[in-house]
Image (tube, rainbow, N blue to C red):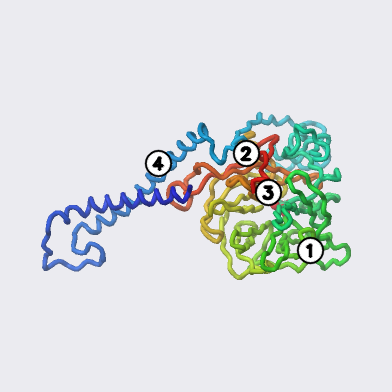
Amino acid sequence: MSGNLGIQRLRAVSDCIRQIAALFGDKKDQKVRVRPKNRKPTTFPCNAGSRYSFTALVWIILGFFLVFHLVSVTQHRENKDSREIQSRGSPLPRTMFRELEVVEEMKNINIPPPRGKRSPRAQKRKTNRWLPPIIEEFLNEDSQLRHIFFPSRKNAVDPMKMTENDSLYYFPGRVWLDTDGNAIQAHGGCILHDERSGTYYWYGEYKDGVTYRAHRKAAARVDIIGVGCYSSKDLWTWKNEGIVLAGEETNETHDLHKSNVLERPKVVYNQKTGKYVMWMHIDDANYTKASAGVAVSDRPTGPFQYLGSKRPHEFDSRDMTVFKDDDGSAYIIYSSENNSVLHIGPLTDDYLHVKNVVRRILIGRHREAPALFKHHGTYYMITSGCSGWAPNEAMAHASESVMGLWETLGNPCVGANKVFRQRTFFSQSTFVFPVQGHPGLFIFMADRWNPSDLRDSRYVWLPLVVAGPSDQPLELGFGFPLWSRVSIYWHRKWRLPNGWSTLR
Ligand code: GAL
């Protein structure tokens, strides 16, 4: 659809240019003019000989921009209208997930007045004046609002015991149990769809250990245990496949020594080598090593062999992801230059190294937690701001090519209430993957971090839809973008369209 729109828009623009050119060209075309002999040669290659040529050129350029802008706005309006008509009317391919686009409101959160009795940790935090009150509440284990952010384990999603009514439903923020009845440990994770076995694998940080701070100013942490892996056929019932890349207990010089940091593991399958390749953020407890590590395995369930870490392109690299394109090429995207810029660069054909090519994007924006995906030839990305374990506002971005110019589309969150939308539903992006058989429908995976007990961090999975006109003008280009809006819809409870997995 965006392709047609683009062609229509270009046609309209070129028609208008022709008309403007005709306006200026007409005078001299109609009169058959005799070239004055003593006229000075002009340096303009076009229209030489006309004394209107410079003015005409300026008008043409101005006219071009004006018309392009008008056409953009009109197309945007038309698009909006047609979307409204579509949503009222006839069955469309997207009708199967229309219910996921219902805007589910949530009443505003009333922040309770400070209470006398708080935990010693919360009392210490009182001095953190810079924290917004809602984040104070989020971080306060004794908050009256705790149940909103971290529902009790009594409400856990247990696929083995759920009643028919709740079967296959996602409940963002609730504890999610695996088939053994244990809370899933796959934080900062990703999903790999293994086409060979028709199985989904969920990899993530296995954080089932004690949360502590290495020193007073350090971020809350759990020692490296390893990367957890879970398998599923329905994206809801997850079987624990164990730790597929384990932390190192004794060798203190090893990247994976328990005292270090292993975050945001991402796994991609390499068709050429037949290997599963895992990239991850490797750091020391103070986050000064800022490197990307790589591991490889013959099977999705490991064990992965750790190959080492590097600073990609010799730059610091913290939050990161890997994106595999349809043509088999893969890219690493990481927060760099002290988290102020995102870097994107291609991986080698075997996915084990970073090529010596890099593009700096979203310069000076301080974005992290990148999650990249593709729809109808356009690349999209969700990022978060940088505020440690505390949630902040997500942004969607888009580009015509991975290594191209990335535009920011705005906050993709829809529904709930303003406070929830401004804090990405109290979570941070980690991965976005397509729902098979439903072009335009994706699952947005995010982490609701619990820095007082990181193992109890929750998963926020929500439907992400790429459809409808963008509602923000481009920042770097002119007018409205040709690509669609990215929306992440809040739902207290939701499920994938019936029979989605059989539509592959
Ligand atoms: C966040 C980052 C997480 C983790 C955390 C530590 O900014 O996204 O992956 O590194 O900081 O404070």
**Residues at marks 3 and 4, CA–CA distance in whole angstroms:** 39 Å
Q: Residue furthest bottom?
A: 356
Q: For marks 2 and 3, give the one nearer the viewer.
A: 2
Q: For marks 1 and 4, give the one nearer the viewer.
A: 1
The amino acid pointed to by label 4 is: Thr
Residue matched to label 2: 489
SS assignment at label 1? loop
Residue matched to label 1: 304
Estimate the x, y position of residue 200 in percent, counting from the top left.
73, 52
- Between discs 2 and 3, the one toward the N terminus: 3
Task: Identify the mark at residue 432; answer none if there is no mark.
Answer: none
Q: Residue at x 65, y 37 (%)?
A: 490
Q: Residue at x 75, y 65 (%)?
A: 296
Of 165 and 224, the residue lying toward us: 165
Residue matched to label 3: 387
**Residues at marks 4 and 2, CA–CA distance in whole angstroms:** 27 Å
Q: Is residue 130 left or right of residue 300?
A: left
Whether disc 3's CB lies below 8 Å from ligand 1 is answered yes
- Between discs 3 and 4, the one toward the N terminus: 4
Of 353 and 436, the residue lying toward us: 436
Is residue 411 at all visible to an observer of this figure? Answer: no
The amino acid pointed to by label 2 is: Tyr
Estimate the x, y position of residue 379 in percent, counting from the top left.
56, 54
Residue matched to label 4: 74
- 10 Å crowding of disc 1: few (<14), some (14-19), many (20+): many
Of 55 and 97, the residue lying toward us: 97
SS assignment at label 2? strand
**Residues at marks 1 and 4, CA–CA distance in whole angstroms:** 53 Å
- Between discs 4 and 2, the one toward the N terminus: 4
Q: For marks 3 and 4, give the one nearer the viewer.
A: 4
Is residue 310 at all visible to an observer of this figure? Answer: yes
